[in-house]
Image (cartoon, rainbow, N blue to C red):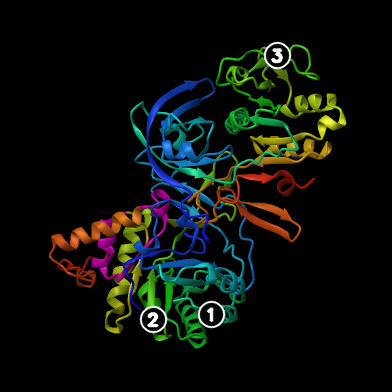
Amino acid sequence: MNRKPHRNTIVVEGAPVLAHTGHAGAQHIIRLHAPQIAQRALPGSFVHLQCDPYLPMRRPISIMRVDAKAGWVEFLYKVVGHGTQLLSQRKIGESLSLLGPIGVPFILHAERPRPLLIGGGVGIPPMVFMADHIRLHHPGFKPLVIMGSEVPFPFQTQPSKIMLPGIPDGVIACMPLLEDWGIASRLASLQAYPGCFDGYVTELARAWLNTLDPSQRQQVEIYSCGPQPMLAAVAKLAAEFALPCQVSLEEYMACAVGGCAGCTVKIQTPEGPYMKRVCVDGPVFDAYQVFGN
Amino acid sequence: MDFATPLVLLSGCVGFGEEYTRVAGFSHHEVGAVCLKGTTLQPRLGNPAHRVFETPAGMLNAIGLQNPGARYVVDKILPTLDFSETRFIANLSGSTVEEYYQVARIFDNSPIDALEINISCPNVKQGGVQFGNDPEMSARVVEVCRKATNKPIITKLSPNQTDIAHNARRCIEAGTDGLAVINTLTGMAIDIEARTPVIGNNQGGLSGPAIKPIALLKTHQVYQMCKPYKVPIIGQGGITTANDAIEFLIAGASGVGIGTALFYNPLVCASINAGIVEYLQRHKLTNVSELIGSLQLHEASAAPCG
């Protein structure tokens, strides 16, 4: 019996850049050749990557897509500081050191085949990964993906052909990739982008939840990643509809393997408060343990 | 006490010993010892976020001694460690001299290989002054720990004081078997938009290559003082390469601590070991011990300033 199942679960991989594109709002999508990480990653997993050979501290970035067969992983990130600024300068063919995949992934439940995925800003990537995972491994599931952004979405939006009850008229913009996968998606923003819901992701989610009958609603579980205030609102919405909810958190990180306890968040448990590490105890947590409600 | 290699994984960087084994290719066999996370008598939740922040050539941390308490560590964690892989060293912290004594007693009755005393903790009975910044308070902590255990004691010295060598001498007189030089330097980073410190605890400990020259000099200063007592030093502070490690050995360290460098590269120990072996071969040395304290100072013209 393996008494130490945690051992050898994370790999260090030198990963050449395969593609790297810039988008509005200082957003970038980078694809790297990292076959071992691509093979092992699950929705919610992240990597700790070196942005530049001369900036040794790594940055945690969540995975947006993987192709285990082709051996690549893809990330969406926004330039917010020195590290991501340097990362944005990496060219095709350059190699980056990746440490991953790290973290407890999102868990799907057979009795809740209507996952509601809510992603905000750079919290969108794990939701895309989750949608891809559902498509490949849970074909009977009927997910809805709601994404919010206050800078232009890092993809060309298009009108969705997938009809959804409860979605306000005119809210038709979707993510083409998800549409191609046959997965319903809708977009929200306060920036009046065409076809997008003019408001918060949680308002759009509430409109959809309100149209479900109680038996359908019992099949919903919420999965979310995004800024802290958005996650708090998502947790509140989940509580309002008595739905289970998993959220992916972020925090400044040093080691990312559980060694330094630098990235902890306070979690409420029946035994009292605990400080849990976002890296290996998370990044996915039960929203009720994080936000109460 | 002998180590299989001169490398020691530093307290606070590797949790309670098993965390880095998550990484494929990492092996405890690469290191002579692993210092476990700072442990107090009662469990502690630690500090609020942010606890870590990158600074030029280094990082700040203020974890706040998050730990499940000494009893839990001894009863629940030590039995899960494989002592055939490396040596494990407990790291003791306390708010009072009595607490250090009690924690040392608990670890004395355990399979732990040695006890490292973290004296860079505020003394709640002395207005929060850190034990380690005062030679007499440092010595007092060592003295009570000495009474509590026959296991080897390593005292981790603070660089945040006027004369580290004097403090080292007092700790040796109080019964320490070894010294760890240095703990982090205190520092701060400010979020200029919010006009608040970035670190939740306001200030934190600075580690990484930024502190290496300071650590190296302190190691040498302590070594010169320790030499007659034959008390070994684990030199530490910003070591990221084999050359860094060799500098510390030449300065007088018998072992070298690896901390922040693991965050850069979790597999760094293998390359540091290989680099040390290559250096020994190139210089026709058979053992690391031949390097220790081999520094040849320049003829010192008394330079009082700068």
**Residue drawn at 73 percent across, 32 percent down:** A113
B260 part of magenta stretch: yes
Position of residue B163 measured from the top left corner of the image (x, y, whole percent): 38, 72
Mark 3 and mark 1: Cα distance apart in space: 66 Å
**Label 2 belongs to which residue?**
B177
Q: Residues under labels 2 and 1: Cα distance?
A: 15 Å
Establish if A189 lies above or below B91.
above
Q: Is residue B231 above or below residue A149?
A: below
For residue B271: magenta?
no
- Disc 1 residue type? Ala
Share a chain, discs 2 and 1?
Answer: yes
Measured in 3D between alpha carbons, the distance from the residue under mark 2 to the one under mark 3, in whole angstroms, is: 72 Å
Pointer 3 chain: A
Magenta range is B241-267
Residue B117 shows which numbered tag? none
Quadrant in which the C terminus of chain A appears: top right
Q: Quadrant of residue B76?
A: bottom right
Asked whether, in this view, residue A22 is left or right of residue A135, the answer is left
Disc 3 marks which amino acid? Answer: Ile
Inspect the image, locate mark 2, and give the three-letter code of the amino acid beneath it: Asp
User: Which residue appears farthest toward the bottom when viewing the image?
Assistant: B147
Q: Secondary structure at mark 3?
A: loop
Q: Which residue is mark 3?
A: A172
**Chain on which label 2 sits:** B
Mark on residue B104? 1
Please report the residue visible at 39 percent of the width from the left and 59 percent of the height from the top.
Answer: B27
Does the rendering let one see residue B227? yes
* Label 3 crowd (10 A; few <14 / some 14-19 / many >=20): many
Front residue (pair B212, B244): B244
Q: B214 or A197, which is in the foreground?
A: A197
